[in-house]
Image (spheres, rainbow, N blue to C red):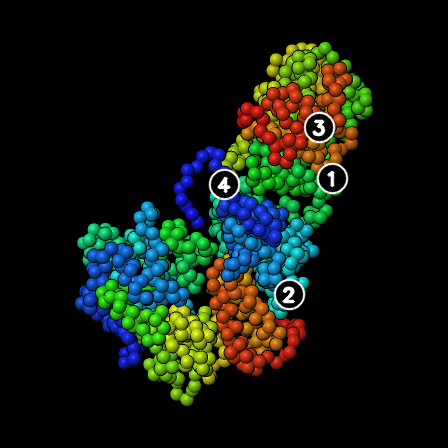
Amino acid sequence: MATTAEPTTALAQPKMVNLTIEGRPVSVPEGMSILEAGKRAGILIPHYCYHPGLSIAGNCRMCLVEVEKAPKLAPSCATAVAEGQVVHIYTEKALEARKGVLEMLLINHPLDCPICDKSGECELQDFTYQEGPAESRLRDPKRFNPVEDFGGDVLYTTSRCILCTRCVRFMDELAQDTVLNVSERGDRALIGKFEGKELTHAWAGNVIDLCPVGALLSKDSLNKARSWELDHAPSICPGCSQGCNISIDTRDNTVVRLRPRPNENVNKYFMCDVGRLDYRWINRQDRVEVPLMRRGEAHVAADWDIAIPATAALLDGKRVFVAASPNLSNEALYLLSRLIRANGGAGAFTVAVGPEAPLPGVDDLALRAERAANGNGADLLGFRRAASPVEGMAAGDVLIVAEADASQISPEQLALASAIIVIGTTLPETLRMASIVLPIANYAEEEGTFTNLRGRVQRFFQAKAAPGMARPSWWVAGDILAALGKGDAYYLASEVFSAMAADVPAFAGMSYDALGMRGLVVSGGAQ
Amino acid sequence: MGYPFPSHAGETPVLSKYFGDKDAISLAGFRKRGGYDGLQKALSMTPAEIVDVVKASGLRGRGGAGFPTGIKWSFMKPGDGKPHYLCCNADESEPGTFKDREIMRWTPHALVEGCAIGAYAIGAETAYIYIRGEFTEPLVRMRDAVREAYDAGILGKNAMGTGKRIDIVIHKGAGAYICGEETAMMNSIEGRRGNPRIKPPFPAVSGVFAQPTTINNVETLAAVPHIIVRGAEWYKGLCLSSPKSTGSKLFSVCGNIAKPGNYEVTLGFSFKDFLYDLCGGPLPGRTFKAVIPGGISVPIQTMEEAEATKMDYEGFVEQGSMLGSGGVIVFDDQQNMVKQIARAARFFAHESCAQCTQCREGTAWTTKIMERIRDGEGTHEDLDTLFSIADNMTGKTICVLSDSCAVPVVSGINKFRSEFEALIKKPTFHPVTAAVA
C-alpha cells in the first residue's frame, strides 16, 4: 500500500477507484474493501466475521469472491478495491466456496432454529437459505458444548457459535474491557471468559446484536418472542442526552426489547445496557386513559371536547407556570412555550443525573450523566433548568405539570396555584388535587423529535398504540392553544415541527423531510 | 553427518559437522572451530554487501517455502526510520523434522552468529529466536550461548567492538504447531494468541510490533556465516541437479528405516541413494512402501516416485511432492496408510488455530471420517466426501494449515486407494444407532 506523504487539506477528497462488481460499475474511495464497495453497488456479499464497526478478522471465509486475474478467491472484507478490478460474486467457483463454508459452519451447528431466539433474524439462516447446501454430509456425531452464563445480560449458547469473534473484538477494541477470548483450538474452540471476568461493562450487551447467529442471547428477552412476531419502529433512546438511535421492537402492542439502530453521527451501531434494558415502564398498565376533571373530592372521566375548553377556561388571563419533563418532544415543549409566551409565566425542568459510562473505542459516545433525551431541546425552547420548576410562581397563577417529576414540587408551591393541570401519562399521588388531568402518549406511542447534547435533532416514530383516549403530547398542547384562541390546532407532528422551525431560530430551515433518519444539528451547534 | 550415526562419505557436513561434539557447544570450543569468523567479516562489510553475497549464493529458505533468502532480506528498506526486526523461526513444529533441534543442541553459537549477521544485514538491532515450547534442551543451550555471547562482547551495544548494536532475545513458545507459521509466530512474540495474520500486509512491511520484520529458519541463518566466510561461489558450487537449488541441506529421517537420524547432503542428491545407502535401507526383511519427504504437510510419495527423485526444491516437485522442511518420514510394508493418514489428520485437527471455518471444521471432519474408515465403518461415499472437503480446505484460508491437512489425505487416497477400499465394507451409509460418546 502506498504511504507517500501527500499534502492534505481539510477538504482533500479521497482518491476514487473505479471497478466492476457483478457487472455493475462503481466508484468508491481508495482503500475501501470489496465487501463495502459491493454494498455501494447494491449487493450484499455474504459474510459473518466482518462488521463495519470492528477491525477486520478475515476468519469466517464466507465473503470469498472471484477477482479476475487473481490466483485465488479473495476474502472481500480484507481485499482492497483496485482500479479496473472486475469482481464476480456469483460464479460457480465463488458459490461453491461459500457453500463449502456454510456446510462446515453447519456440520456441528445444532440446527435448533425452532427453539432459537435468533431464528428469523439469523445470518446463518439467511445465507444458508440463499446459497447453502440443502443437506449435510456429516455422518458422525455432532460436537456439543453446554450453555454458559457470560454475566450481564448475556447468555452464550456455545454449540451455535461460529467463532466469528465479533464479540471478542467488540470487547477488546471498543469496550476496551478484555473479558472474552477464543479458548482452545481446532473444533474444540469456543468463546471463553477470562478468569474472574464477566460481561458487566455498561456497553457489553452489544455483543448480542453483533452475534450473527444465535450464540449470544439476551437473558432479558430470552424466549419472549419469535423474531417474526415483532414489529419494529425507529426511535431514539430517551435514557440520556446522547440520543442513541434505537429500534423499538413490539409484540402485540407490548415493547419486548430495544435494539440499537445505526447512526454514524451519534451511536455508530451501539447502545448501552442501561438504555437497552430500561423499557418496562413503556408498557406500564397504571396509565391515565381518559381526561379527568375534578368534581368535589373525586375525578370524573370527561371527553376531550369537554376537558380542553375547561382547561382553557382555567388558563384564560392567568399567568402559567409549566413544570416540564426533559423527555417531552421538541414539538410538545414548543407548544407549551407558546402557551407561556401567550399568557406570561415561565417554564422549567429538572434533569436526573447519573454516572457517565463511555464506550471508549468510539469517539463521543457515552451513557451521559444527563439522564434525559431532550434537555438540550428544552433549553433551546426557553425552559429553565431549575431545582424547583415553579420558581417565581405567585398566588393565582396556573401550574401545568407536563410529565414532570412531581416530587420536585413542594406542597406549599402546589397550594399557591389557582389551578393545577396535569398533562401526563400517569397521575402521581401528590397531584391528586389537580383540577384537570389530560392523558398523553409516552414517547413510544407518539411521533416527535429530541435534540441531543450535541444539538442533533432526531426523529422518533410511533411504536405502539397509546392506551384509551390518550393523545400525543403536542396534540394536547396545540388544542389548548387553539381553545385559548392563541394558535391553531395541529393534527400532524410534522406541522408542529414546521411551525417551530419558522418560529425558533435554532431550528430554522429544518423539516421532518430534511431531518431524515440521521437528524440535523441545530444552528449554533452544540449547547 | 548422519548424527547419531557416523558420517557417511556421501554427506556434505557443513552445518552438521560438529553434531555430537560436546566441545563445540561452548563459545570457546566454537571459536576454536572457526566460530564467529563470519560475523567478524560481516561486520566489516556493509549490509547491502552481505545481502548481495547471500543473493549470489542462491541460499533459499530451509523452513519449507524455499524463498530466496537474499531477496527476502532485500525487502527490508534501510533508512525508513522504523525499527527493523529479525525473527528466527526455531519453532520446528512440523512432524518428522528435527534438524533445527540438533543445530541448537550442538552448535548454538552457529545460530547466534547467523542471527547476528542476519540482523545486521537487514538493519535490525534486535533479533528474536522463537524456540518451540517442547524444546527444553535446545532452549537451555541457546540461552547459555546468548549469555556467553553477551559476556564476550559479541552481542550488545558494541557488537564485537564495532560500535554496532545487536541484541538477541530468546522467546519460548508455548507448544503450538501453528506458531511455526511466521505471522502466528509474530503474534505469539507480541504476547497474543498464536493466530496467523491476513497477508497483506507482509512482514517486511508490517511484522512483529507492526514494524518491518524478516523471518528466517534456523538452518537458513546457520548457513549464512559459512557463506560469508567461504563466499557465494563456494555455496553455489554445492549443487548436484537444479541450479536453482544450491548448498547443503539437512534431512531428518524417521520411520521404518535402518538408520534414522539427521543427514546433510548437497541439494540434488539422489533420494534413492539417500534412503538405501546413507540411511541403511529398510529394516531387515521389510520393504519400503511410501515416503513423506518434507514434513507431514507435503504429499506422500510412492517408492517409485521417491526413487526417481533428485533431492532439491525442483526435484521433489517433479516427483509429486515438495522438499518442505526436509523431514523424511518412511513407511514400510508393515504400515497401513489409512491408519497413518488418519493420525496425520488428527494432528492437524488438534493444531488448527480455529480462525478459519474450513480449517477449524474441515480438519476435525476429515479426522472423523478417516478414523471411521480406519475402524472399518467407512463407505465409498466417504472417499468422495473426503475429496470434496479437501477441495474446500485448499487455497481458501488465511494460512496453509488447512491445505496441509488436505494434502496427505488426497495424495494418500490417490496413491493408496486399495488400502482404503480394503477397509471399506459397506457401499453406502446406513445410520448406526450407537452410543454417542
The answer to whether residue A124 is visible is yes
**To which residue does mark 4 refer?**
A14
Residue A113 position, x and y percent, is 67, 56
Provide residue A495's location: percent of width, then percent of height.
71, 26
| Distance in Å between CA atoms under marks 4 and 2 | 46 Å
Query: Above or below — where is B114 with respect to B294?
Result: above
The answer to which of marks 2 and 1 sits earlier in the sequence is 2
The kind of secondary structure element at disc 1 is loop
Query: Where is mark 3, residue-wise?
Result: A493
In front: label 3 or label 4: 4
Q: Nearer the viewer, residue A467 or A20?
A: A20
Q: Position of residue A313 (x, y in %)?
A: 77, 14
Using the image, determine if residue A358 lies above or below residue A409. below
Q: Nearer the viewer, mark 2 or mark 1?
A: 2
Say which residue label 1 marks.
A253
Left or right of A122 on screen, residue B419 = left
Which callout, 1 or 3, points at the residue further toward the start of the chain? 1
The secondary structure type at the circle numbered 3 is helix
Distance, label 2 to label 3, CA atoms, is 54 Å
Which amino acid lies under the numbered mark 1 shown in the image of this protein? Answer: Asn
User: How many C-alpha atoms fall within 10 Å of the one at disc 2: few (<14), some, or many (≥20)?
Assistant: few
Of badges 1 and 4, the one in the foreground is 4
Quarter holding the C terminus of chain A is top right
Chain letter of the residue beneath label 1 in the structure image: A
Of the residues under marks 4 and 2, which one precedes in the sequence?
4
Q: Residues within 10 Å of mark 3 (few under 14, many from 20)?
A: many
| Residue for badge 2 | A136
On whether disc 4 and disc 2 are found on a single subunit, the reply is yes
**Chain of the residue on which disc 2 is drawn:** A
Q: CA distance from mark 1 to mark 4?
A: 47 Å
